[in-house]
Image (cartoon, rainbow, N blue to C red):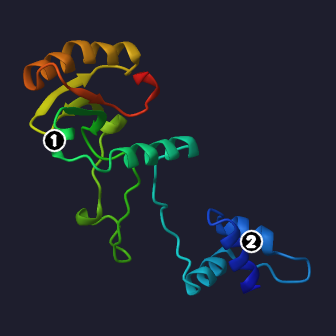
């Protein structure tokens, strides 16, 4: 039974104990409880954890990134001096979008030090666009509503370009990620 539980988990680490219970149960054997399944997995070193998040990058884009990096491997500070780097970021005004974990002693769930404060409707967030070069920080522009290509073009024309001319002159290179609204 233990080998079947481990095999089921290794085949698909996202399987829940209920899913594993269904897959390992046979008519001639007793049905292991979900708790027993979790204990067997823990004894074998397979503890439940939140998975690490990573950006989804296609094979084509991965190859293009590596090729770009190889082409610029020998560049020094002088070659990078006239580049402008930019991105958008969301800042939560209160709390986090992610799951929060906490460990507390049994019976102390409602003790103040083990509570996480919340506000109704999430507390809101602010989306901003910003840029920088090797010599200075660029402007931070608040994005109201949804960022689409028209909002992005307006930011480039009326925020980034005047800053770049004032700080870097006329010879600069603008770097951006491959977000679809940037094309």
From the image, which quarter does the C terminus lie in?
top left
Horizontal and vertical percent position of residue 103: 35, 71
Where residue 177 sits in the image (x, y, percent)? Answer: 38, 34
Q: Residue at x 29, y 46 (%)?
A: 95
Residue at point 25%, 28% (across, down): 173
Which quadrant of the figure has residue 97?
A: top left
Visible in this render: residue 56? Answer: no
Image vertical order of residue 111 relative to residue 164, above or below: below
Q: Which mark is residue 150?
A: none
| For residue 56, above or below residue 130 | below
Residue at 45% over, 48% down: 66
Q: Is residue 54 above or below residue 150?
A: below
* Sequence-earlier tag: 2 or 1: 2
Marks 2 and 1 in Cβ contact (< 8 Å):
no
The residue singled out by tag 2 in the image is: 21
Q: Tag 2, which secondary structure?
A: helix
> Which mark's residue is nearer the viewer, 2 or 1?
1
Residue 67 pos. (x, y %): 45, 45
Relative depth, front residue between 20 and 6: 6
Secondary structure type for disc 1: helix
Nearer to us in this view, 125 or 131: 131
- In the picture of the structure, the residue carrying the numbered disc 1 is 78
Please tell me how crowded label 2 is: few (under 14), some (14-19), or many (20+) other residues with Cα within 10 Å: many
Could you tell me which quadrant the N terminus lies in? bottom right
Tell me the quarter of the picture where residue 119 sits. top left
Spatial CA distance of label 2 from label 1 is: 61 Å
Vertically, is 1 above or below 152? below
- Residue 166 makes an appearance in the image: yes
Query: Which residue is pictured at 40% across the width and 18% down the height?
Result: 148
Crowd around label 1: few <14 · some 14–19 · many ≥20 (10 Å): few
Q: Could you say where residue 46 lies in the image, as x and y percent from the top left?
A: 56, 78
Q: Quadrant of residue 27?
A: bottom right
């Amino acid at each position: 039974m233990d080998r079947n539980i481990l095999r089921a988990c290794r085949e698909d680490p996202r399987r829940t104990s209920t899913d594993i219970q269904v897959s390992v149960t046979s008519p001639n054997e007793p049905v292991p409880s979900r708790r027993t399944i979790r204990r067997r997995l823990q004894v074998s070193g397979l503890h439940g954890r939140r998975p690490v998040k990573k950006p989804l990058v296609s094979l084509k884009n991965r190859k293009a990134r590596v090729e770009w990096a190889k082409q610029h491997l020998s560049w020094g500070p002088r070659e990078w001096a006239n580049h402008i780097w930019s991105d958008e970021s969301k800042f939560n005004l209160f709390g986090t979008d992610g799951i929060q974990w906490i460990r507390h002693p049994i019976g102390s769930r409602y003790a103040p030090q083990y509570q996480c404060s919340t506000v109704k409707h999430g507390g809101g967030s602010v989306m901003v666009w910003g840029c920088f070069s090797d010599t200075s920080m660029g402007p931070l522009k608040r994005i109201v509503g949804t960022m689409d290509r028209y909002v992005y073009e307006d930011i480039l024309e009326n925020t980034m370009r005047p800053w770049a001319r004032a700080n870097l002159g006329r010879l600069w290179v603008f770097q951006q990620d491959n977000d679809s609204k940037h094309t």
